[in-house]
Amino acid sequence: MKSTFASLAIAAALNASVSGFALAQDSVEVLHWWTSGGEAAAVSVLKDDLQKQGVGWQDMPVAGGGGEAANTALKARVTSGNPPTAAQLLGMAVNEWSEEGLLGDLTSIADQEGWGKVVPDVIKNFAVHDGKWQAVPVNIHRPNWLWINAKVFKDNGLEPPKTWDEFNAVADKLKEKGIVPLAHGGQPWQDATVFDDVVLGIGGPEFYKRAILELDDAALDSDTMVKVFDQMRKIRGYVDPNFSGRDWNLATAMVLKGEAAMQLMGDWTKGEIVKANLTPGVDILCVTAPGTEGSFLFNTDFFAMFPVGDSKLAAQHKFAASVMSPSFQEAFNLVKGSIPARTDVSGDKFDACAKKSMGDLKSAVSSGTLMGSLAHGHAEPAGIQRAMFDVVTQHFNSDMPSKDAVAALVTAINAAR
Ligand code: GAL
């Protein structure tokens, strides 16, 4: 008996030191911008999943919705020769880091796990470069949503708006009653999120493609684009006086508390809705942004691995495989508000808004109306994106006439090309 206990104790001690060693080796430092309540809950799902496999998590959060601050921090880390093990990237950023030849190659694990068969082409186009897997997709977010406080609408006898004219009519009624129509945070990426919706809603999918994805001069310098800026000016009149600089999740909180009626934002808002014990699609309605039914703007969060030495390769591969596993994609996206990036994950456990997203994604793929979001790094490289953001934000925060905004947009894009 004694000897059995002794050998068990020795085995336990050995095990502890082995797993201690494994943990020290198998840890990943992950740079990301998921710092709101709902986003942090989603990070925990990822962290716990990795920990179960003996991969430790070193957190490197950089606050700031849309990830601009995180990208700046990442550039500084890489430039100083001290990259993180892994980093969250949006699609265009995957392209840019990959062109620099700075991302780890995940092709062997992708082939082993058969990712090619379950990831849609539109996402593969960002993840795979020159035949090499350079990043793993965690989700598909949809930025063209309008979130509505159901009680505020019901109490005021309002119906969800389907067009921008209906939106203006509803917003005017709310304003007359002293209710803030639109919760908004005045940050360039949030202004651009609204701009995406207005371009698509007013111009339609073909116009969005020509103006935003192809930067076609005739579409950019058009009467339709003048109408887009006219609508942006109307929207400026529907936000409260304290909108400047407000974080997106604080704007969401205004809708959840009934302090504002609506928000134009991606479905990461659902993380906040669920955290507040409210039900998406019931307490907070999700309808496609005005005029955008039938189209699906998307953005995907990827994780890319930076070459930090062979000692981290095993952990990086475990991380990538874990992110791509169907059970993780389900568990994570249930919390994050997005839908899985794999086509073979069942939608059964998802809420009404995610189910609509899944259905709309399929129809958008077949009708050719699935398009990358400019605001969320899936339409243009960073230089052009920034130039466009600047004009949109400058117009939103001034009395600039729409025609001048169109001219400024064309000039800014040409200078950045
Ligand atoms: C998006 C990102 C989402 C969400 C949002 C707000 O760009 O894809 O995952 O976090 O920013 O931070």
Image: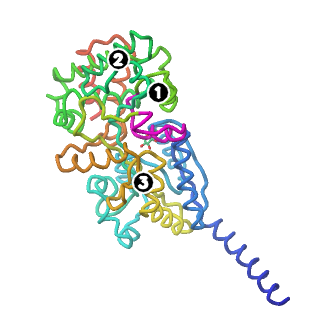
- Kind of element beneath mark 1: helix
Figure quadrant of the C terminus: top left
- Residue shown at 74% from the left, 78% from the top: 12
For residue 240, above or below residue 209: above
Along the viewing direction, whichever of 86 and 96 lies nearer the viewer: 86
State the residue position of label 3: 349
For residue 26, above or below residue 61: below
Figure quadrant of the N terminus: bottom right
Residue 222 highlighted magenta (yes or no): no
Q: Earlier in the sequence, mark 2 or mark 3?
A: 2
Q: What residue span does the magenta drawing correspond to? A: 263-284
- Kind of element beneath mark 2: helix
**Residue 171: mark in rendering:** 2
Q: Earlier in the sequence, mark 3 or mark 1?
A: 1
Of tags 2 and 3, the one toward the viewer is 3
Which residue is situated farthest in the left direction here?
218
- Kind of element beneath mark 3: loop
Label 2 CB sits under 8 Å from any ligand 1 atom: no
How crowded pointer 1 is (Cα within 10 Å; few <14, some 14-19, many 20+) is rated as many
Of tags 3 and 1, the one toward the viewer is 3
Disc 2 to disc 1, C-alpha distance: 14 Å
Disc 2 to disc 3, C-alpha distance: 34 Å
Across and down, in percent, residue 407 comes to: 23, 19
User: Mark 2 is on which residue type?
Assistant: Ala
How crowded pointer 2 is (Cα within 10 Å; few <14, some 14-19, many 20+) is rated as many
